[in-house]
Image (tube, rainbow, N blue to C red):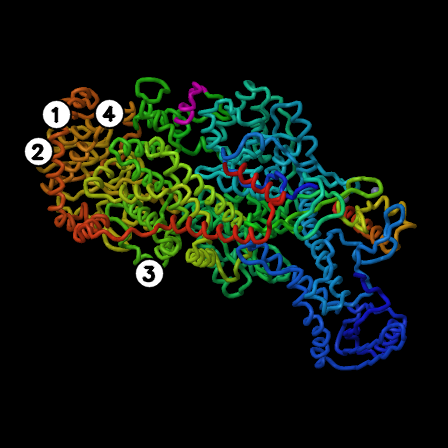
Amino acid sequence: MEMPCNGDVPHDVWAVHQISQNDLILWDLLSLVIFHVLLNIPYLPINQLIKTHILIFLLVIRAPSDRNVVLVFIVRIDLRSYVVAELVVQEEWDESRGSLFRHFLPTEASGKQSKEDEERAKTQRQFINSYFNRSGGETDDHFDPRRIKCDDLGIPQDLSKSYFVMSQREQQEIPHSLSHLPAWLVRHFEYVIRLSCDFFNEIKFKKIRDLRKSQRELPIAERKTEIVDLLKDHQVLIVAGDTGCGKSTQVPQYLLEAGYSGIACTQPRRIACTALARRVAYETLNVYGNEVAYQIRFETTKSKRTKMLFLTEGLLLRQMENDSLLQQYNVIILDEVHERHLSSDLLIGLLRDLVEKRPDLKLILMSATINLALFSDYFQGAPVIEVPGRLYPIQLQYHPIKQFIAEAEKKNHKIDPEPYLRILEKIDKETPSNQRGDVLIFLNGVAEIETVAQTLKTYAELTKGWIILLLHSTLSVDEQDKVFDIAPLGSRKCILSTNIAETSVTIDGIRFVIDSGKASRAGRTGPGICYRLYSQEQFDKMDDFTPSEIHRVSLQDMTLRMISLNLGLDPRTFPFIERPAEDALDEALEKLKFQGVLYSDRENQLTALGNAVAKLPMDVSIAKMLIYGCVVDQFDVMLTVAAGLSVQSPFTNRSFREPDTVEKRAPLTSPMGDPFTLIALFREWVLQKAYGGKAKRWTIENGLDEHRLQILEESGFIEKPTAEELGEDDSRQRRIEQGEKRKLFEMKRAARNKEKSRKVLRAEKHFDTILDERVEEEIEAETDIMKTDVKTVEFLLSHKQRDVDVIRSSHKLRRKEAEIIRLVIACGLYPNYSLLDPANKYQQGQEIYSHSRLKPFTQIHPNSSLVQYHLHTLNAQEDSQNYSNFHQIPFYGMLLETTKPYVCNVMPVPALYALIVAKKVICEDWKLVTVDDFVEIQFKSSNACREVIDSVIQIKKELKIGLTSALEGDKLDMHRLARTVDKFSRYLTEEGVVIGLKRLVSPPRILEDVGFFTPDGEVKIDDDKQEEGAEEVQESEAEREERQRLEEEDRAVRQFLGKDPMCPMTREMIEEEEEIAENKKKPEKKESYYEKLLKAQKEREEKSRMNDEGQEDTPTKRQKVEAKDEVLEEE
Amino acid sequence: MMSEEVGEGSKEAETGEETEDVTQLNPFIQFECGICGMKENTLHGNLQVSDGFFNCPVFFVRDPFIPYTRVRARKPCLADFLVLGGTCSMCERSVCIDKACSVYFGARFCAICVIRERRRFPEKVVEATLKAQAQAEASAAKSN
Ligand SMILES: [Zn+2]
Ligand SMILES: [Zn+2]
């Protein structure tokens, strides 16, 4: 078909003009119009003419051009008629566009399109619509790319707009459905589609140009070639530059570009690992690939394609245990070494050694400029590249606060939010709201952040111009991620952060930094203003150096890690970049001996227990707990408890401020302490996930942080026996599982990609409500089984039906199990126990104080479920002489020093349990027992004392035997131990062993002459192992009967227990009761969420396959390639 | 013709879930603009997808700003890719699509060729190129 050409434009030309009131211009314009029409140039420079007020409605009706008759109607109208005029123009386009869009850009069925596709299609329609609305579709172009005639150089010889568009489309016959439209309009439409493709491409191209430009402008960029060149000839390189110079984001890219692979870059913080991986992936245009990945404790995006891995220092250290030469890496970058964490100090020492053993290995140390000499002295001969940090013109403004207090005195100082508020006001006043720019405030600690945040939020609600966000390490990852989202137009985000954001985390768009005292080296990506709430003079006095962790904390963890590296390292002779204090080192070694991790009589040697402890990636106490959990056959539960101890609380911080939520979740908590609350919560959550499919809603309603529960769930990955190991596998089963897995992987990928796109923050949603929107989304998603989130998918991936069943049964604790579990927890937590202050008042809202051996006057954290819901259980109701049979001592998982020392994750146990777990127990007269030179227990009756001590010795021995055999790989039946413990605890409660409890003030730091001493002499716990073992086997027949008898008893005392403040009924017990009552009235087996999900996925696939078959008869090459890809990806 | 499904790094690979040799295969080449010096790792070839194509081989990557989703039966389209450059049809220099470096006018022409052959190009084309070059220079001068 021939294209209509210029001369026979077959339709009327419409145009709308709006011009200035000035008549001269008006007539100029009119003559211009007439001139155009007469000369047969339909194009009018409309855009430039649209100005104000008066509107000229120009109607040109033209007969076919060969007759050369032109009628021109010029109508002058005012603005009120404008709408009418536009409608006339719009009408024609409106009439034809429907069929044009339908033909060329049909709307895809929703299953066939991703959300991004839909959005893109929408933008494209907008682009095309506005093109035609703007020009009225008026042009003299022929739009026929096939008409193109080129000269010998390939240059087209006429000037069609379409030649300028690089995106091409196959041009087809105009179909019947469009035959009623002018062919010219159809071709014009096709041209605009092509134009829109170019337009999208150009936007993306510009984005990359801008990105590259900003990279080039980083101070580090000037040294790029130098860095790469130096690394060719040197094994070790030191890059020193303050934050803002771009070293953390750029140096990895320089290496990638220079062709290095197997690059590891360590970061002190997990958040920096994920943030940097994201940033570098983005800058290398590899956001959705895995070339750049991160690895943090329970999570990794690493794959075989990964060339660049960001990981925590601790993780790299652990990798050295199995791969002491770090063969998997070619380049190691230690970033932020100036922060002087234990692990980085250790890595520096180890890697200096390693570069000598591996001449092919490259090592780059990156540090701020402050401590530079220390590192360059340590690595003699290594070239140093020093980069200035000031990246953008930064204006410094000093706003000293009167009550500025030096760092040292700051502890008890309550922060005043006022100055921060003033600065926000100042910004509002001085910066037009259409100029973008966000605020970052540095504060010391969570308490300060929360105080200032409340005030600023009030201001934000008033002005509606701010979104207040928080960034600190106790927030969930979801909450932390929010700081990267973009503030909506017309408002700014204000991020209140501890210094975790100080390094490596780059938040786009920060323009103002408010610094309260510590040197702020904000990761800023543009020029800005830094408001300092102190004077220049004060700033000059500030100490630049943060003391290294070695000087600040216990070296226990580090010495253990050092020893367990099996590299024959001696903490006392290790070539530390700065030697730790001799006595601190000694104390650490002592404590490890104290905990039974190191042999007390051999240098730097792990005991069997110690070996097991060192293999677990957690604190010594938690690891011990897990191992004992294994001994008593409660591994699954202990995994939950152990993981739970590393999170402060399973509840979201904000939920504590919501009385309704606090009240609602009371039944979920356990009077036996926080670890038991956690077990119950976790079990409930798993069941909600597996059966309800409404876990999100459930977590919201109860104020639970799902990410923290996730950590518990992930902990299950530790050495979980595979199906094969359990002997439950057959090949058919495996095939089914693989198929399911593949589908789930696909969903996981889709879900993860969805999460990666950066979102725009919702106005007027601040730190405390920020997740609501997302939560709403997720709750909604739960109703649609296909819109499932990453976590759920991952959960399903890792948990098969039977795992859920395992958790369901293992986390349902009966009294006897609960009893042994709390003993095991106490074993692990020891020596973290404390004595309640006699002045405590056990009433709601009271502060409860306790004293631990080396830390008197700590407060039980008010958010502990124990303090919130079960305070009365701590009350010993002692008589005037301090005697009671209810004395308890709280063990705790964590000592948190914020505004004051708090103990978290608290679990009270009967005071006499101390005798079982303690290292040093002395009883000289069957009446008075001292524990660890710290607790004095006065028995009222010496018979009771004997009885107790006998039981304690028996339990200690059984525990020891169990441990030894478990570590040797033989697992004994530990029911006997459970029974002994249970008997002991019931003896304590039923007989009512009355004791008095007294704290010995200032116990010695190091315990000497440890052991278990009775008036009969020292009791050796380890000695009679063989005997006991033999006994164990013989007893097993009688045991069964005994167990049945005990279970009867168990039921019988249940009633009594409900009233027992030392062990009230747990939720599980009540549940158990109910179950017995219902008696085998088994509910119909519900279809699990997992099963539903797989079914839905299957249906969807079925549908899309049918669609496919309908559309394409022969498989195209594309499909083949795609199919192959899949094989590579998932098999 | 090169298929749009090139073994690109943009697939999420589960550790240990794929065969070894794929990881060695690197379809990326280094593209460098002969005029502005822009350097990127890209794919190179003819790009032909469901809703369009390019006249000559281009340097392209999968759109790095939009997640790579595999919706079954959804055919790849132009918008899934980002074209960074092409080859000058006169001098065969690799050039980026920046208006200061090249112009698409029936085929891709690098700025050097456009200016050299300015008598044979329409005035509009030459003017646009000169203008873009002047702008690029001005902004470069400003940032230095
Ligand atoms: Zn260029
Ligand atoms: Zn050229």
Q: Are marks 2 and 1 in contact (CB under 8 Å)?
A: no
Q: What residue would you read off at disc 2?
A: A942
Q: Is residue A891 left or right of residue A280?
A: left
Identity of the amino acid at label 2?
Answer: Ser
Q: What residue would you read off at disc 4?
A: A1010
Q: Chain ID for label 1?
A: A
CA–CA distance in space, label 4 to label 2: 23 Å
Local crowd size for mark 4, using a 10 Å CA cut-off: few (<14), some (14–19), many (≥20): few
Q: Is residue B12 left or right of residue A828?
A: right
Residue A197: in magenta span? no
Secondary structure of the residue carrying numbered label 4: loop
- Of labels 3 and 1, the one closer to you: 3
Q: Is residue A1008 left or right of residue A1017?
A: right
Query: Nearer the N terminus, badge 1 or badge 4?
Result: 4
Secondary structure of the residue carrying numbered label 2: helix
Q: Kindly tell me whether mark 4's CB lies below 8 Å from ligand 1.
A: no
Residue A621 percent coordinates (x, y): 32, 33
Identity of the amino acid at label 1?
Answer: Pro
Q: What residue would you read off at disc 3?
A: A660
Identity of the amino acid at label 3?
Answer: Asp
Q: Quadrant of ligand 2?
A: top right
Query: Nearer the N terminus, badge 3 or badge 1?
Result: 3
CA–CA distance in space, label 2 to label 1: 12 Å
Q: What residue would you read off at disc 1?
A: A1015
Q: In the rendered image of this protein, does residue A896 appear above or below residue A142? A: above
